[in-house]
Amino acid sequence: MSKATDELFKNVISHAKEYGFVFQSSEIYDGLSAVYDYGQNGSELKNNIKTYWWKAMVQMHENIVGIDAAIFMHPTTWKASGHVDGFSDPMIDNKDSKKRYRADQLLEDRIAKYENEGKTDKAAALQTAMDDALKAEDLSRLKELIIEQEIACPVSGTRNWTDVRQFNLMFSTQVGAIADESDTIYLRPETAQGIFVNYLNVQKSGRMKIPFGIAQIGKAFRNEVIARQFIIRMREFEQMEMQFFVRPGTQKEWFNQWKEARLKWHLALGTAPEKYRYHEHTKLAHYADAAYDIEYNFPFGFKEVEGIHSRTDFDLSQHQQYSGKKMQYFDPEVDPETGKPFGNYIPYVIETSIGLDRMFLLTLINAYEEEDLSTDEKQDSRTVLRLPPVLAPVKAAIFPLTKKDGLPEKAREIMDKLKLDFNVQYEEKDAIGKRYRRQDAIGTPFCITVDHQTLEDNTVTIRYRDTMQQERVATDQLEKIIGDMVSWKTVLK
Ligand code: ATP
């Protein structure tokens, strides 16, 4: 990270705290590593991002429905899904500092270092060696690579390493009063399995016909070995996932369609396309036959925000095997090749999986600007969040020019009408200029000032966040002006 981008990232983090977007969890007790709380403005922004996703995925598609499954699931779910045996990261400890690292990340950092130094051959050779070791699950080879590369612990500076071990990322807890092993259950590490185990329920009760999708937004938990980069890697986070069930053989087509549709969803918010890129997985998970990430260029580089995965019939087949319940679908449509119905099959699945917290950070960083407003006469600046108005936590702020002469009452009267449709705020403290700055800092698209003229002719001054232009409008136009700008129509097609 260059000094300027490092600085920018730090400023965004402190802005997020100062203006009630994100706080460290249990901060009064010095926080809990990799866990965060959303404040008064953060939770509004987060809810708006959720609504945007839900509307785009569920409401805009006749063949996609949404569910809300529990976090706790029958423990066999995680046996069937492969998480009990396979959801782990290789970790290594430094014996002097007692710090724990992910072995693959130590090597990845070294690869990045080679790349920065222009040593692309060395970077490629190490990448291949690491990929081979990971694929073969050869943990002693991973350690050998760390030793060969003379990688030292950043804290102790020594190369006194333990062996590499697998570390399961699932949190477990006990259900019931007696703690024996059969009572161990897990906090779900992904929301997807809640969809798979409900596949039959939804298909039958909703009379869903293939192709169809099931969407869900919810918490997921992973005991990440190293947490870093603020809300990019958390131990408790939220996912927005959709599983799309298709006829076997059509998965490639649907995969490409969803890959494009999902990038369009991101770009509809007005983000510059060059900030995004696709990353194709060359090393596929055991259940996948294709996988792409949608990555965003954060101040610390391109990072995955969303994954599009072609998961084959792996999950449903596994659940069929472990539960003994048939996961088949009868497809009455006639196959033009055989002239007979496609008949019974276990559907294939295309998954779109986006991290809500990463999307939140992306939105915040993309909107954040320290704008220089200096003129020849005076120095001036403002910090403004140029959020898409539809996502802004507060849509409009209403200010009486002064605290007397009936202006507060008039301002509240206007607010009481607007609050039925929009999240609005009333502010009467400080000079108008200061109030504007506070609203700019949380990304409020409109500020409305009520003055003495308002009492005479029912007009107000409306001030626009992005241009800082002001105009005089009739109060009965406010609903339309605000409504048009913050409508879901601005982003949904
Ligand atoms: P990474 O490689 O960055 O650990 P992943 O490939 O394990 O991510 P998936 O299992 O595909 O991630 O999960 C889907 C999405 O969930 C990711 O694209 C990401 O946005 C989000 N996500 C995954 N792990 C975390 C985490 N620890 N904290 C916040 N978001 C996460």
Image (cartoon, helix red, strand yellow):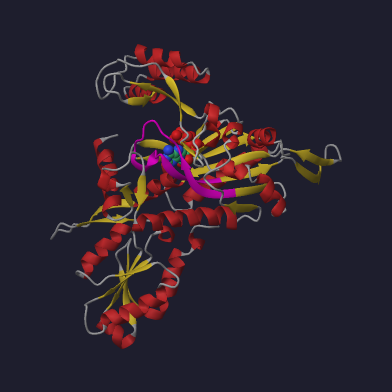
Q: Is residue 428 above or below residue 72?
A: below
- Extreme residue in the right direction: 339
Q: Tell me, yes or no, if residue 294 can be seen here.
A: no
Q: Which corner quadrant of the image does residue 82 belong to? A: top right
Instruction: Please give the range of residues in magenta.
Output: 215-241
Whether residue 225 is in magenta: the answer is yes
Depth check, front residue: 483 or 239: 239
Depth check, front residue: 98 or 182: 182
Quadrant occupied by the N terminus = top left
Q: Is residue 284 above or below residue 460?
A: above
- Extreme residue in the front direction: 178
Depth check, front residue: 217 or 269: 217
Q: Is residue 348 above or below residue 25?
A: above
Q: Is residue 203 left or right of residue 42?
A: right
Q: Is residue 144 left or right of residue 198?
A: left
In the rendering, at what x and y percent does residue 450 appear? 29, 78
Quadrant occupied by the C terminus = bottom right
